């Protein structure tokens, strides 16, 4: 049986904030990039597989420590989506049904402080719609950027100064595929536009925008052993991504390891032999 829970949270901005590594440091009470506002709110308790859960419409503002926070977006995760899983439209109703696994469904409402007063600062981040959390992967390239400094700041700080018009191009990350950019309501202006993977920001604009991702689907690769090479190539890629995450101390390492375990199981069950988890990958046995 599944529970449907609503969580309200503040997206962290200001001095000391960063994406890689996450600052403030995430913990059991505060997910990556967020500070919880109050306690989680139970909406439905103990609902069965196939039951439909409808988004509870969030408030337009929240006041925390005397500061007014404004609605940014809502995500619904954990179930089977009926339509989109994320929205910046406070009047849109997201819907999911409970999966056969009975996994809990979570509605996350994110709020943000407006009007930092810093002209030309762009704030961006990457959000995994499937998991309902911000992720730490490098995810964008900014142009023009002759020295690479702007791209570095965009990925590691999640913020950069737009002294001129810039195009922020998102790309697929380790565990998820790019879905869409969405601009946070009440930020940016007419010069800030979205086209596919590109977010164009105008000179001296102040905009907050998030790139949204969906988890990569697991594709069953059919037998016979001739297909093992394709499966092994996937394991090679996940192994490299896992080793990179470990080397850089990224939280995504745990998820990547779990993905490797799953791919390794598929490798074995396909008759390809030789387990591979996060280390040296052996040669494919000849059919």
Image: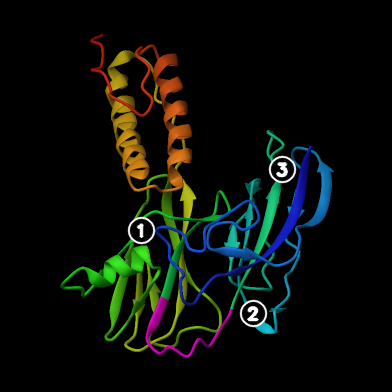
At horizontal 46% and vertical 84% (from top left) the residue drawn is: 188
Residue numbers of the magenta segment: 113-122
Judge whether 13 appears above or below 134 on screen: below
Say which of marks 2 and 1 sits in front.
Answer: 2
120 and 284: which is toward the camera? 120
223 and 251: which is toward the camera? 251
Q: Secondary structure at mark 3?
A: loop
The quarter of the displayed image where residue 76 is located: bottom right
How many marks do you count on the picture?
A: 3
Q: Which mark is residue 72?
A: none
Whole-percent x, y for residue 81 in the image: 62, 50
Q: Secondary structure at mark 2?
A: strand
Q: Which mark is residue 69?
A: 2
Whole-percent x, y for residue 223 in the image: 38, 16
Badge 3: how crowded within 10 Å, few (<14), some, or many (20+)? many
At horizontal 36% and vertical 22% (from top left) the residue drawn is: 276
Badge 2: how crowded within 10 Å, few (<14), some, or many (20+)? some
Q: Rounded to the nearest whole Å, what is the CA distance between mark 2 and mark 3?
A: 31 Å
Q: Which mark is residue 98?
A: 3
Whole-percent x, y for residue 88 in the image: 58, 71
Indicate yes or no whether the magenta region holds residue 120: yes
């Amino acid at each position: 049986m599944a529970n449907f829970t609503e969580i309200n949270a503040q997206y962290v901005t200001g001095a000391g904030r960063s994406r890689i590594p996450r600052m403030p440091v995430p913990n059991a009470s505060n997910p990556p990039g967020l500070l919880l506002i109050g306690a989680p709110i139970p909406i439905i308790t103990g609902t069965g597989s196939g039951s439909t859960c409808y988004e509870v419409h969030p408030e337009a503002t929240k006041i925390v420590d005397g500061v007014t926070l404004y609605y940014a977006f809502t995500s619904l995760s954990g179930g089977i989506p009926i339509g989109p899983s994320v929205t910046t439209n406070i009047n849109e109703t997201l819907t999911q049904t409970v999966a056969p696994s009975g996994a809990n469904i979570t509605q996350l409402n994110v709020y943000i402080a407006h009007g930092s007063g810093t002209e030309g600062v762009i704030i961006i981040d990457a959000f995994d719609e499937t998991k309902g959390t911000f992720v730490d992967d490098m995810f964008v390239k900014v142009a023009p950027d002759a020295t690479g400094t702007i791209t570095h700041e965009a990925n590691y700080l999640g913020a950069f100064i737009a002294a001129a018009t810039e195009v922020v191009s998102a790309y697929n990350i380790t565990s998820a595929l790019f879905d869409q950019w969405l601009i946070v309501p009440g930020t940016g202006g007419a010069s800030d536009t979205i086209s596919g993977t590109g977010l164009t920001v105008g000179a001296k604009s102040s905009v907050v925008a998030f790139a949204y991702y969906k988890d990569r689907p697991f594709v069953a690769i059919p037998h016979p052993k001739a297909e093992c090479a394709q499966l092994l190539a996937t394991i090679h890629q996940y192994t490299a991504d896992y080793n990179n995450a470990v080397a850089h101390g990224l939280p995504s390492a745990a998820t990547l390891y779990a993905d490797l375990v799953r791919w390794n199981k598929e490798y074995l069950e396909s008759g390809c032999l030789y387990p591979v988890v996060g280390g040296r990958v052996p040669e494919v046995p000849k059919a």
